[in-house]
Image (cartoon, coloured by chain):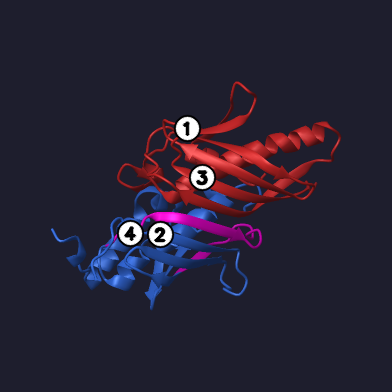
Chain colours: A blue, B red
Amino acid sequence: MDYNSQSISAEDYGRMQEVFCNTGHNGELGLVFEGAGEGWLEYRLPWKEALVGEPGSGKISPSVIYSLLDSSGALLPFYVLGRMVPYPTLQFRVDHYRQPESQRDMIVRGVSARLTPDISFVKAIVHEGDPDDPVAIANGTYMSVRQLKK
Amino acid sequence: MTSPYYQSFLGIRTETDADGNAYCTFVPGATSIGREGVMHGGAVASLLEAAGFACLRAALDQREAEGSPPLTAEVLSTTVDYLRPGLSIESFAQAQIVKMGGRSASLLVEAWNTDRSKPVAAANMTLLIRPREG
């Protein structure tokens, strides 16, 4: 099987997001795919008690916010390249701008900042409805599992 | 502190080693999987952050024992380097304080599967220390 030739159909994207959001860690969090555009993917995380950091605060844990941001970048190369090319996370940095509000859904958008055969650079943001008032921002570096052929 | 509830929901536990230092153990279930047999990068980060919080909490407790008013901390930033695949088996993490000042702390945290000298991930955490309200 030629690793570089697995092109993705429109239906594949839907199925891929379905699996991505509903299995493993993302399924546990309750990630919901919201939409995709030119070089970006957006997800929503509905609030639930189990995701809260400090008991009784209603505020989603910073570790959950980290996971959201990391996940928002994971599938970007698939969309940008149109091919099934896994890029696991190599390094990821999250800056927490402020505490989340109590009992609020989180919206995350991952943007492909630069994509090469080796590396996917991602900028991501979490907000509660107003992108100009972010809860956290992230810069991620992902590396392809092997170097791609041009 | 702002993390323990979610971490305990994941199944991360905090223990104390023979030297009295806090560390975390984690037996990842299906809910922490990223891809087959490997933990999600976010689950690894949750383990690292739990160890970071546990380590700093112990230091804040010490400061309170020495007469400080009640203190809490919130994470300002976390940077994780993913060094090896984090296998979905029992895993560990422990933090060390690089510097704790009056208002901030810088921590180094490592997570490993079976061999501490082969960490699966390493993190730098920067936290804000402030008086606990209420």
Q: Mark 4 lies on which chain?
A: A
How far apart marks 4 and 3 lie (CA) works out to 20 Å
How far apart marks 1 and 4 lie (CA) works out to 26 Å
| Location of residue A121 in the rendering, given as x and y in whole percent from the top left corner | 44, 66
Residue sitting farthest toward the top: B18
Residue underneath mark 2 = A142
Magenta segment? A85-110
- Give the numbered dot on residue B122: 3
Asked if marks 2 and 3 touch (Cβ < 8 Å), the reply is no
Asked if marks 4 and 3 touch (Cβ < 8 Å), the reply is no
Q: Which residue is drawn at 43% across and 54% down?
A: A90
Q: Residue at x 63, y 29 (%)?
A: B21
How many numbered badges does the structure rendering display?
4
| Location of residue A5 in the rendering, given as x and y in whole percent from the top left corner | 18, 66
Q: Residue at x 66, y 40 (%)?
A: B97
Residue underneath mark 1 = B116
Residue underneath mark 4 = A144
Q: What element carries label 4?
A: loop
Is residue A113 toward the left or the right of residue A13 in the image? right
Q: Mark 2 lies on which chain?
A: A
Q: Which of marks 1 and 3 is nearer the N terminus?
A: 1
Q: Which residue is drawn at 61% across and 49% down?
A: B125
Quarter of the picture holding the N terminus of chain A: bottom left
Tell me the kind of residue under disc 3: Ala
How far apart marks 1 and 3 lie (CA) works out to 11 Å
Question: Is residue B78 positioned above or below A107 on the image?
Answer: above
Q: Dot 2: few (<14), some (14–19), or many (≥20) neighbours within 10 Å?
A: many
How far apart marks 2 and 3 lie (CA) works out to 16 Å
Q: Which chain carries label 3?
A: B
Quarter of the picture holding the C terminus of chain A: bottom left
| Location of residue A48 in the rendering, given as x and y in whole percent from the top left corner | 52, 52
How far apart marks 2 and 4 lie (CA) works out to 7 Å
